[in-house]
Amino acid sequence: MAEHNWIKIILTPFSLVYGWITLLRNFFYNVRIFSSQKPPQFTISIGNITVGGTGKTPMVEYLTKILGSKYQIAILSRGYGRKTKGLLFAGDNSTASYIGDEPLQYFSKFGKNIVVAVCENRVKGAFSIYEKFPERNLLLLDDAYQHRAIHRDINILLSDFNRPFYQDLPFPAGRLRETRSGAERADVIVVTKSPADLPNIEKQKIRQSIEKYSRPGVPVFFASIRYSQPVSYDHQRPVLLKNVIIAAGIANPLPFTIYLRSKYNVVKEIIFSDHHNYTPTDLEHLIKYIKNDTFVVTTEKDMVKLKPLAAGSGVLDRFAYLPMEINFGADTEPFDRWITNQTL
């Protein structure tokens, strides 16, 4: 712990420099030296100011579900981890290496009810979606909080309960992509991965900490992660588990692994880096631990990349994934009402 503190002290001056650079960039956007372009669609950005997973993917999926009956939705992502460049649209033959794992997950889950596109240039991507699909009148920007070249109608900021932005520092001493003052751009803040039974007094303390950096009156909601029953890779059917091998390539696998340990007998944990692109060698490594009563259990994001490999090796029936969704609990009705009123 002492060594960690010394490293943090040494890196803090570099964090100050990085923080000032981000402040200057934001100032140029605020005074319109740098310009932002407004897409034709009503645009909602979902993002964070922290490096790592804060629950953006389940948040995008939640918005897709509750707004899908009102809007024709398109999702635009950078497509992190893909091996391609430029503007691409998801299709039936898309792979994670072609469009990225999260965009593939969106398309796999919602199919042709939505349009999924990837592009490094969000402005180009938004206008290209409109040209090809003019009926798509709601654009969800996945992980675009710092992409200020594109204007958004609603800016949703996510903050991980376990790693709140207001207790962190900019890179490299901390995990922030910009200074804490970046929260001023948020129209709503969601504290993700909160305990489902978080007391109101604790919620109020967190709100007070957030209000030091957000605009006055910006609502703060709390959401937890809810896991569903495990689903087999083959035929997408529920499956009963006893002994499991955990395989995950996500930013913060700890909540996932803790949940599985609480429910099943975990015989092996194999953790990869975030957005890991699985190879046949990885599959072979996983298969060697499988016994008759054992399943390899992954996240949904890992499933979309591992499933083709498992299918090719004939072991789909030994793999399962754990669906997860964001759960607003007592804040469900207030949040749904807020977001619906903002999009009227």
Image (cartoon, rainbow, N blue to C red):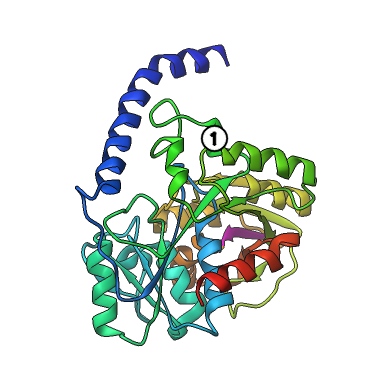
Residue 266 at x, y percent in the picture: 70, 49
Counting from the top left corner in percent of width and height, residue 23 is at 32, 36
159 left or right, relative to 117: right
Residue placed under numbered mark 1 in the picture: 166
Image quadrant where residue 324 sits: bottom right
**In the rendered structure, does residue 49 fall within the stretch colored magenta?**
no
Q: Residue at x 35, y 56 (%)?
A: 80
Q: Is residue 34 above or below residue 45?
A: above
- Dot 1, crowdedness within 10 Å: few (<14), some or many (≥20)? some
Which residue shows up at 77% across the image and 47% down it? 198
> Does residue 316 show up?
no
- Residue 171: image quadrant is top left
Is 90 positioned to the left or the right of 32 in the image?
Answer: right
Q: Residue 88 at what x, y percent from top left?
A: 26, 72
90 w.r.t. 81: above or below: below
Q: Nearer the viewer, residue 135 or 56?
A: 135
| Span highlighted in magenta in the image | 295-299
Say which of 66 and 55 sits in front.
66
Dominant SS of magenta comes to strand
Residue under the point 28% across and 63% down: 122
The reply to whether the magenta stretch includes residue 296 is yes
Q: Quadrant of the N terminus?
A: top right
Q: Compared with residue 32, is residue 117 higher up or lower down, i.e. above or below? A: below
Residue type at numbered disc 1: Tyr
- Element under label 1? helix
Work out whether 45 lies above or below 216. Answer: below
Toward the viewer: 247 or 344? 344
Q: Is residue 175 visible?
A: yes
Is 124 on the left or on the right of 249, as rendered? left
- Residue 162 place in picture, x, y as percent: 62, 40
